[in-house]
Amino acid sequence: MFNPSSFHNLSNGQRTVHLRIVETTDLHLHLLPYDYYADRPTKGIGLVNAARLIETARREAPNCLLFDNGDFLQGTPMGDVVAHERGLKKGDTHPVIAAMNTLKFDAITLGNHEFNYGLDFLTTTLDGAEFPVVSSNLATRLGAAPRQDQTLVKPYVLLDRIVRDDKGETHKIKVGVIGFAPPQIIDWDAHALKGHLFSRDIVKAARAWVPEMLEAGADLIVALAHTGIGAARHSSGMENAGVPLARVAGIDALLTGHSHLVFPSPVFDHLPDVDIKAGTIAGKPAVMSGCWGSHIGVIDLLLTRDAGKWTVLGTRSETRSVSQNEGEDHHEHAERQADTVARAVATAHAETLEAIRRPVGQTDCALHSYFTHLGVNASLRIVAHAQADYVRRQLATTNAANLPILSAVAPFKAGGRGGPEGYTDVPAGPLALRHISDLYAFPNAIAALKIRGAEVIEWLERSAAAFNRIRPGSTGTPLRNSDVPGYNFEVIEPLHVVYDLSQPARYDAQGELIDAEAHRVVSVEFDGEPLDPNAYFILCTNTYRAGGAGRFAGADVANTIMSDAKVMRDILHQFVARKQRICAKTGGSLRFKALPETSVLYETGPAAREYLGEIAPFSPELRGLTRAGFLRLKLDMSNGV
């Protein structure tokens, strides 16, 4: 935790100003600590809980600014209720904006998920903000250069603030705040944005706008960058541009996000230009505060002013965890702040609870994601069937009507960063609307690609990056590659696929081809025959994937044969309502080539104990819980299952 006295020792007797910057990022509409999919309270997340930390952080420092780094608008069923059921009329205030107004944010930027509900909805949402919204690389019209663009919102803002120094005297300071978003937004939501929104490279936008901010009198520049911390070398259009962005002259502090990780932390220790002990990137103080309100980021700047110019003497960066502060006695002001935020969103919460409990249909089998990487895919299969049904009907009168239809789906909730409770778990019986949201957690729109069988096989090879290489005869190797999130592990219905995990991966976690000679896909069968690599297929997917996210073979706008604004959750909802009773036990399969005398470790949610019979061929042995709370299993790979 921050120690003010040691920080001020950097001043060498100079008169100094301690300015604190606090960040939230990737809230994804987790305003209250409530799991709408399980329909129960939860811990460790939520803006209401983060509000206590924010208020405490404010009271520790004489001067404080609060920013949000994007991806605040979508992520829980509340988002769908507000967007699709209640609606947002001109003059209404969206619950997340109401909460931010209550907390008196100084400025925010936009992330990629702000655009999931379309531009009009976003514009109406932002109309209720009592603070500036900035983003410099998103434009409704591109000019000859970034500074000639017609940006969607202000590219930057100059905040005139009065700060108090260590002697109690006040000073004027002009804090420049600039925003950035992943340029891939245009592809990920192409169905809604194509022709209406344009993007520029993050670093190029910064190099254009930061000098203007300095010319306009900015004493200090804070970058709200909805981008991750990745490669040190700049490449045009990069998604995770945190390191090269930090190198842009004039930027004094960097707030990052998008990756749902925490910085400073050991996760980034191997990266060049990143110092996790100092909490800096390319020498600039930086933070990334997790997701869902799990953390706040705190950057402390020690400033001095000489001859009218502000100079940064020293910096400190840290994150503060909600879970580590739960159960503690908070100051009455912190509790009051949390209560105020809770009241601001109470009506929306009640409306969401009513909506998610509404009956939709019935399932004759449990639908869960505890073993999706082991080929237990009933929860994915029902989504795949809904996708295929919709696409088939849409293409019925086109030239593609007679092409065979495949359907690619991924487990959005498969542990990992989502924690041991981050799994889909729908019991057999009545299906409510909350179960539909549990089966498909994002408001992605439907899309379909026309690709060859060879590209389908490459799609599966890309998906196989989700597994570690397993040496025959080995024991104790984790089956899953922890660098590959669940949403990049694709299963294609109704294919029967066999992987050989003794082979090296053909693609890395980012979808980069790393071994052209490697082939993990042993066989792929369709309709009882080997998949023809030269035949054309219709592959159902979503606009996010079709736009290139995850770098899957054939996922390109040029191959898109169908794309519309129909949201997958609505398609799934209508499919279940039409069928009334569903069961998805039969369909495609995922198996592994036998590895004699070989076993692996597999981590899943503790509630998976109830379903161990579904993976009996692996002879699962319980190996207790990990420190993070995951259930660890030993699996036998000897027989090929």
Image: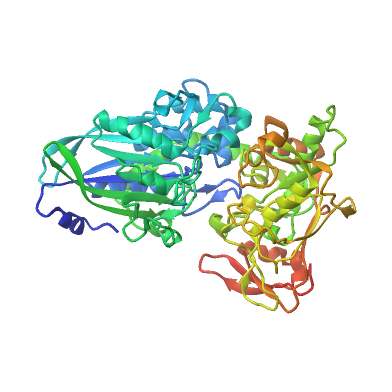
Q: Is residue 625 left or right of residue 500?
A: left
Q: Nearer the viewer, residue 347 or 232?
A: 232
Colouring convention used in this rendered image of the protein: rainbow
**Who's the residue at 31% across and 30% down the image?**
212
Q: Residue at x 18, y 57 (%)?
A: 5
Is the residue 111 above or below the residue 334 in the image?
above
Quadrant in the picture for residue 623: bottom right
Rendered location of residue 558, percent (x, y)? 69, 34
Outermost residue toward the right in this view: 528
Of residues 91 and 428, the one nearer the viewer is 91
Where is residue 76 shown, x and y percent of the image? 56, 42
Q: Is residue 318 above or below residue 179?
A: below
Q: Is residue 415 left or right of residue 448?
A: left
Could one spot residue 333 in this view of the protein? Answer: no
Q: Residue furthest front?
A: 517
Residue located at (24% from left, 50% from top)? 60
Question: 505 and 352: which one is in front?
Answer: 505
Looking at this rendering, what residue extends furthest in the top direction?
Answer: 90
Q: How many marks?
A: 0
Residue 440 appears anywhere in the view: yes
Whole-percent x and y of residue 604?
62, 63
Q: Quadrant of the N terminus?
A: bottom left
Give left or right: position of 110 versus 513. left
* Residue 101 placement (x, y as % from top left): 38, 33
Q: Quadrant of residue 614?
A: bottom right
Quarter of the picture containing the C terminus is bottom right
603 over 309 or under it: above or below? below
